[in-house]
Image (tube, helix red, strand yellow):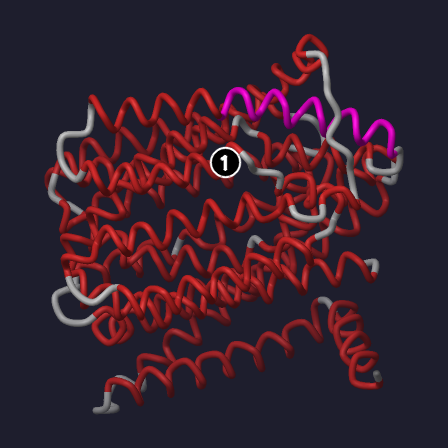
Amino acid sequence: MKTSLKKNFILQVLYQILIIITPLFTAPYISRVLGPENVGINSYSYAVTSYFAIVAALGIENYGSRLIAKTKDNREELNKQFSQLFTIHFLFAAIVYIIFLLYCVFVVKENKLVFFIQSFVVLGVVFDINWLYFGLEEFKKVITKNSILKLLNVALVFLLVRDKADLPIYVGIIAIGIFVNYAILWVGTQKYVKLQRVNIKDCLVHIKPLFVLFLPAIAVMLYKYMDKIMLMNLKDSSSVGFYDSGEKIIVLCLGLINALGVVMLPRVSNLKAQGDEESINRYFDKSLFVIGFISIGCACGAFGVASDFVPLFFGKGYDPSITVMKGLAITLPFSAYANVAKTQYVLPNGKDTFFARTLIGGALINFVINFLLIPKCGVLGATIGTICTEVFVCVVQLVAANKDMHTFKKLVKVSGFLGIGIIMILTLSLLDGISSDFLRIVVKVFSGGLTYLILSVLYCWFVNKQILVEISGTLMKKLRK
């Protein structure tokens, strides 16, 4: 990998680690202060708001970053494409924001104030230009500002949220924080691009590709938040709270794993424009192996500590979240590999329609399974629906990539990590006799991680020694500096 790519990947990983660490402080506090019902109300209102936000986004993140990556070497063309894309997105997103406000007024019957506060999330999308920096591979600017605001949010939660009546305050801290994250990125944009006046007719050329990528974005949001919305309507707000809590750690792990995808989409899109197929294949091969190591380790680790982690982390009364955390841990490798296929093969090769159909199929599967199982099984039914969906999307996308990238042949090398992960789970089960809850978690995390790391290094030595050579070489260079 080039130095800039490694730097961007490291920045993304560090930011995802920050995202993981901050809920480790706030989630136990919020789950105890607000309780399962209020946690469920917040989760449900955010899920509904996210549908409007994703409609407002109009698929711009993937399309925008890909377009910027292809034109970044021509400043005049870059200014033109950025101005056209931002204008059409701004107008569309502003209309969606107004519709959401009307929805809050005329449709929402309960917790109106919470929904109105959540509107800042949709308003933020109106001014979103993350895609510009991602396309330019200028991740440092985005990550630095977001990190500062993330830490400020944590401080405000502890200072201002004191009891169940403070639910609107908590929602406000998160929603307004998201808005500021979007808005603050406009500071310093003149260094990279100039916003120009454009003819609306010229902007219409972006409508079709935006809508093609808008469909999979909607599909992702459908099965990402469908579980919580269906749980609220088919069960109750407490069930949403249990599901949200169990899902939280898995989502954080997935964010860390998918950091690679964020930096690889613009890089592979740029290589595709240059016709450098050799580099694309090399990156794809490395990504599959590294993602296999990380995702399987996270999945097996989360599965192995769930029974101890949930009661200690969220407090008493969250036992159903154990089932959710264990079940969703299974989805981590599937989600991770689907992301590799998406960012390094499907989207760079312009297979947007195929991508949309894949995710719409996944959303339909999730809806049917949820509809059948949630009334009888509650959070377990929602968990099963998500597992089936992630497996379907992953397999279909890997099959599509197999013809050109020989995906399944490369995945054989990764299968050894699954065996190592099972050994780690068995190792963790031997530590159940430790009486102290906190000490048991600490020992399990340390011993499980060490076991997985040592066995994985030995496995790499025999199967993919080149990866070890590259990693050790990079570390030695850093230490010499």
Q: Is residue 422 visible?
A: yes
Circle 1 SS class: helix
Q: Is residue 88 magenta?
A: yes
Which quadrant, please, contains the C terminus? Answer: bottom right
Q: Residue 19 in the image: state x and y as whole percent.
A: 48, 62
Which quadrant, please, contains the N terminus? Answer: bottom right
Viewer-nearest residue: 184 or 423: 184
Q: Residue 198 in the image: state x and y as whole percent.
A: 72, 17
At a point 21% along the width and 91% down the height, the residue shown is 435
At a point 42% along the width and 35% down the height, the residue shown is 122
Amino acid at dot 1: Val
At a point 74% along the width and 63% down the height, the residue shown is 7
The residue that mark 1 highlights is 125
Q: Residue 4 in the image: state x and y as whole percent.
A: 80, 58
Report the side of 365 relative to 29 (left or right).
right
The quadrant holding residue 454 is bottom right
The quadrant holding residue 107 is top left
Q: What residue span does the magenta drawing correspond to? A: 75-93
